[in-house]
Amino acid sequence: MSRFIPILAVSLVVATMPSGFAQSPIATGATANSSGGTRVPLFTELKDIIAKGGVPDSIEQLQLLERQQRLVAKAAVPCTVSVKIGPAQGCGVIVTGSGFVLTAAHVAMRPNKTAVITLSDGRNVMATTLGMNRSVDAGLIKINAGQNGGQPWPHATLGTSDDLAAGMWCVATGHPGGYDQERGPVTRVGRILAVRPGSIVTDCALIGGDSGGPLFDIAGRLIAVHSRIGNDVADNLHIQVDHYDYSWDRLANREAWGFLPGFKPVLGVKRASDTARAKVGIVHRGSAAADAGVKSGDVIEQFGDLQISSFESLKAAVADTMPGERVAVWINRQGKRIRLSVEIGREED
């Protein structure tokens, strides 16, 4: 079992390029100097500490660092959003005035799902999930047009993952446990513990529901998105913002690919060899299918909203889910159609 788990809060969990975004806003720096960004000026006395990841050596520097963190937290509130898809809740961060939202792939789940975005003031707007690179847990959502009176959405100033180093200060925001209007987004201050090719590790204290929320550097630039927590609440993985740049075209085109390491979804059945249909030959003991009541000889006819015509189409449908997600499955058992509820399992390491 992976030592990291997704931090999504759950009750139990050929398209065209969007107009005007042939290039990633991360690559073009589209929000770097635009109104509504989150970048804040740095106190001169802190520049060396911030660049090298050091610690204050006086009360005055400590007070300045606290003021700097407060400025970032205040700027981050308007673009930090809650994301709800069905019974599952996570977070996201708006990164363009037109309403593109970066989140974690396990929050977005799959392309073309309807999402409810809750802004910091409590207003709900509708959005649609786009693509997801599950290999690094990166997902993309777009707020549906026509919901802001023609005005741009508040959005984060985009940074880069290139120059990050252990020891640097950072600010995490999110809606742990779900949106709370009286509380608003929650801010956690921490430091980068490690920089890896596929992620960064921080000691910002994250909990369930923070998945998909933003991580800022001390100048207010978005550097990562929350992905998973470890065995300790202060041991967290974040998706480097540059990963959204690398795969922007595929994400915007609603592609979904890869598996989050240690979280490959499995149903736990093998096909029967005497049919072209999705007929079950073997049900593995202790699997998701066994727990749901699937039996040898059952023919799986529908998986969620998808009609299943073959075992290959069943495998593709399962691959498009996330471990822990509940899916309604219809089977044909000796001529009788039966509905089962399956909680998708995950492949052991």
Image (spheres, grey):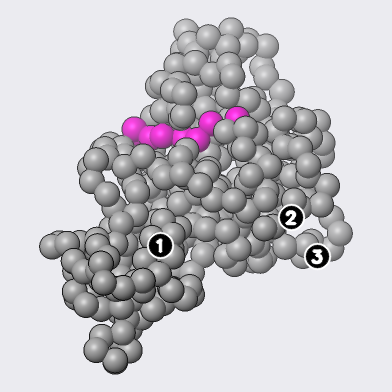
Marks 3/1: CA–CA distance: 40 Å
Secondary structure at badge 1 equals: helix
Question: Depth check: 84 or 301 in front?
Answer: 301
Report how many numbered discs are placed on residues in the image: 3
Name the residue at the right extreme: 150
According to the picture, the residue beneath numbered tag 2 turns out to be 16
Marks 2/1: CA–CA distance: 26 Å
Q: Position of residue 251 (x, y in %)?
A: 62, 46
Report which quarter residue 16 is drawn in: bottom right
Q: Position of residue 307 (x, y in %)?
A: 47, 76
Q: Is residue 70 left or right of residue 97?
A: left
- The quadrant of the picture occupied by the N terminus is top left
The amino acid beneath tag 2 is Thr
Q: Position of residue 204 (x, y in %)?
A: 42, 33
Q: Are marks 3 and 2 in contact (CB under 8 Å)?
A: no
Report which quarter residue 237 is drawn in: top left
Magenta segment: does it hold 240? yes
Q: Is residue 78 visible?
A: no
The amino acid beneath tag 3 is Gly
According to the picture, the residue beneath numbered tag 1 turns out to be 312
Q: Is residue 98 visible?
A: yes
Question: Depth check: 260 or 10 in front?
Answer: 260
Q: Position of residue 211 (x, y in %)?
A: 46, 47
Name the residue at the left extreme: 285
Q: Is residue 191 left or right of residue 229?
A: right
Give the mark, 3 or 1, whose residue is nearer the N terminus.
Answer: 3
Label 2 Cα neighbours within 10 Å, binned few <14 / some 14-19 / many ≥20 = few
> Bounds of the magenta span?
234-242
